């Protein structure tokens, strides 16, 4: 035996193959070595039933899927080979579904593949004929791909746990629905296995450091009460230490969602139509134009009072810019040309302002409270929420990142967090909250189910969503293999992004009326104009009456002095005359 092993070692070494000689008793001492190599090929020589039992005992501490196995029954006693090699009873080697083991019985040339679907039975597939020359001839009906050969699980039952309220899987009357549920049903039909829902939980699962155990669906799998968790589980390093995952079915960026600020017309909106330099140009034009026009008139008429002329021209210029008419159009061609140019400039400015103002007010321009995670933390007026018992909660709870710790300080207590994604969006619509979740989750919720419009900010993290399985699950490989085939032929995309049809009632979309705050700037401008106009009117009335009374008093004093020096006689129809004695009498006579 040793001569044979050393001969093989020498021959393999010449081809660059590293070989390690072991006996069954020392296999447990080589665990550290095995963990450092890629994937070994174990060539096992069994010469007696005692060797077979010792080999079976040594395999108790090994994961058979770790390596590939070639078991050779050599010089085995006659009469025992049938019960051990040709027709093994039960599952003496504790084989699993993902075990890769080839067996060659003595005095036979047929290589058999051994694996197990059920714990108490060994499955045998005739693979190839081993020729004396060292070549192999595969049987025609045998596929070279292991997952294609083992596509029939013979009705194996997998215990499943489902998260209640999940967006990608639903359970109605014991039947799986939703995109992830449909994928599992297709796999069951393809691979001939069934899923038995043993529990439905409210959380995906997080690690409780105080209790030293996992909660939710992850806890059900860790405690071996379930084999598979059907739902959109986030793949994190903490979870991958205790469970396995399929390859990511969906990859989505994470975002923080908050209620979209209502669009209202701000007081400054009417001034944002033009830039500051444009407003300054218009103001300078209104101020300097009356001075130039007054200078042009003063040079032609010297009897005009300059201050009154400037004020009149200023009112005319202001009226032109306010689309009012001119009380008196000048006769001189130069002044007419100046006024005409001013009218064209005012008309162009007013038209452009009106067009820009309409566009500016009708196209919503929403001012967001923050545009980054740092801005959210700096704002400090919003609180953070995540779905209770998810990987997102653990990320903020145990992360050592500075920004994540600051965001954790803004998170609501655990008992106040939502239990589902839809509940989280509804909470966002009710208060100053931000909801941390993936973009795919948001897309999977119908917009009419969210009672408000929401905005989002990129969180800078990609979330990988997959189905969870128990650690070192023997069916992970074949499930991933056929999921990859679904992806290659487009079936997976169709299942993931075709929403399940739900019975929906027609929704009535209530459009919001224009509220008083939306038109408050317009009302304020109108009220201000009325008040300003009334004030000017009262001032003009007061000034005019004061001026009129003053002129009457002056005229009365002059009349009195004139009557005193030159009396006036009033002649009536009968020819009588009477002397006016006072100015009042004179006014009455007139």
Image (cartoon, helix red, strand yellow):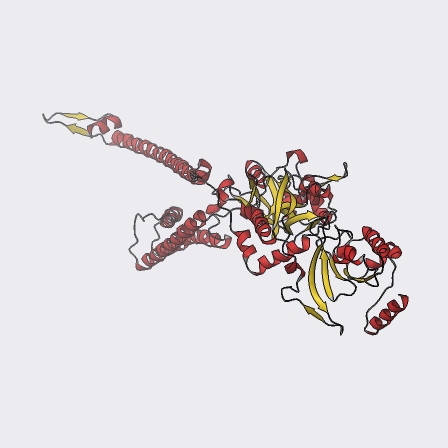
In the figure, 475 relative to 562: above or below?
Answer: below
Q: Is residue 568 left or right of residue 299?
A: left
Image side of residue 563 versus residue 360, left or right: left
140 or 488, nearer to the observer: 140
Quadrant assignment, res 162: top right
Is 247 placed above or below 508 here?
A: below
Residue 300 relative to residue 497: left or right: left
Residue at 64% over, 64% down: 143
404 or 90, which lies in front? 90
Quarter containing the N terminus: bottom right
Q: Compare residues 588 and 294 and report the one nearer the observer.
A: 294
Q: Relative to residue 574, is residue 470 depicted above or below?
A: below
Q: Quadrant of residue 3?
A: bottom right
Residue 80 placed where, x, y %?
81, 56
Q: Quadrant of the C terminus?
A: top left
Residue extending farthest to the left is 574
């Amino acid at each position: 035996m040793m001569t044979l092993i050393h001969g093989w070692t020498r021959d393999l070494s010449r081809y660059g193959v590293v070989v390690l000689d072991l006996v069954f008793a020392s296999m447990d001492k080589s665990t550290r070595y095995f963990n450092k190599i890629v994937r070994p090929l174990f060539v096992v020589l069994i010469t007696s039933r005692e060797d077979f039992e010792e080999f079976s005992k040594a395999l108790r501490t090994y994961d058979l899927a770790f390596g590939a196995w070639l078991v050779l029954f050599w010089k085995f006693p006659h009469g025992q080979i049938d019960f051990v090699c040709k027709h093994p009873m039960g599952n003496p080697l504790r084989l699993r579904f993902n075990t890769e083991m080839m067996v060659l019985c003595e005095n036979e040339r047929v290589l058999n593949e051994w694996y197990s679907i059920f714990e108490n039975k060994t499955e045998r597939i005739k693979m190839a004929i081993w020729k004396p020359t060292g070549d192999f001839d595969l049987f025609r009906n045998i596929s070279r791909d292991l997952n294609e050969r083992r596509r029939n699980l013979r009705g194996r039952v997998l215990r499943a746990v489902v998260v209640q309220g999940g967006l990608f899987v639903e359970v109605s009357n014991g039947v799986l629905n939703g995109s992830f549920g449909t994928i599992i049903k297709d796999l069951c039909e393809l691979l001939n296995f069934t899923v038995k829902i043993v529990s439905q939980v409210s959380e995906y699962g997080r690690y409780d450091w105080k209790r030293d155990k996992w909660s939710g669906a992850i806890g059900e799998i860790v405690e071996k009460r379930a084999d598979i968790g059907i739902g959109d589980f986030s793949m994190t390093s903490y979870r991958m230490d205790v469970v396995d995952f399929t390859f990511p079915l969906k990859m989505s960026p994470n975002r923080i969602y908050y209620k979209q600020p209502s669009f209202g017309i701000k007081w400054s909106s009417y001034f944002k139509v033009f830039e500051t330099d444009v407003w300054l140009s218009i103001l300078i034009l209104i101020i300097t134009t009356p001075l130039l026009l007054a200078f042009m008139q003063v040079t032609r008429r010297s009897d005009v009072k300059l201050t009154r002329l400037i004020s009149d021209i200023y009112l005319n210029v202001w009226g032109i810019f306010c689309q009012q008419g001119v009380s008196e159009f000048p006769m001189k061609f130069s002044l007419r040309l100046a006024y005409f140019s001013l009218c064209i400039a005012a008309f162009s400015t007013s038209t452009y302002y009106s067009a820009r103002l309409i566009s500016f007010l009708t196209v919503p321009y929403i001012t967001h409270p923050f545009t980054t995670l740092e801005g959210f933390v700096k704002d400090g007026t919003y609180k953070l929420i995540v779905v209770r018992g998810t990987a997102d909660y653990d990320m903020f709870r145990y992360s050592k990142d500075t920004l994540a710790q600051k965001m954790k300080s803004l998170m609501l207590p655990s008992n106040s967090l939502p239990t589902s994604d839809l509940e989280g969006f509804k909470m966002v619509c009710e208060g100053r909250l931000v909801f941390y979740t993936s973009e795919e989750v948001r897309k999977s919720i119908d917009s009419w189910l969210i009672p408000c419009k929401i905005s989002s900010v990129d969180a800078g993290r990609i979330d990988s969503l997959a189905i969870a399985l128990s650690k070192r699950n023997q069916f992970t490989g074949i499930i991933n293999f056929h999921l990859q085939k679904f992806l290659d032929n487009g079936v997976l995309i169709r299942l993931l992004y075709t929403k399940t049809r739900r019975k929906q009632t027609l929704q009535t979309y209530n459009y919001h009326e224009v509220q008083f705050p939306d038109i408050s700037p317009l009302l304020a401008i109108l009220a201000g104009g009325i008040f300003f106009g009334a004030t000017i009117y009262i001032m003009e009335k007061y000034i005019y009456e004061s001026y009129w009374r003053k002129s009457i008093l002056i005229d009365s004093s002059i009349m009195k002095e004139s009557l005193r020096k030159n009396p006036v006689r009033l002649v009536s129809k009968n020819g009588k005359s009477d002397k006016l004695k006072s100015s009042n009498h004179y006014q009455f006579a007139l």
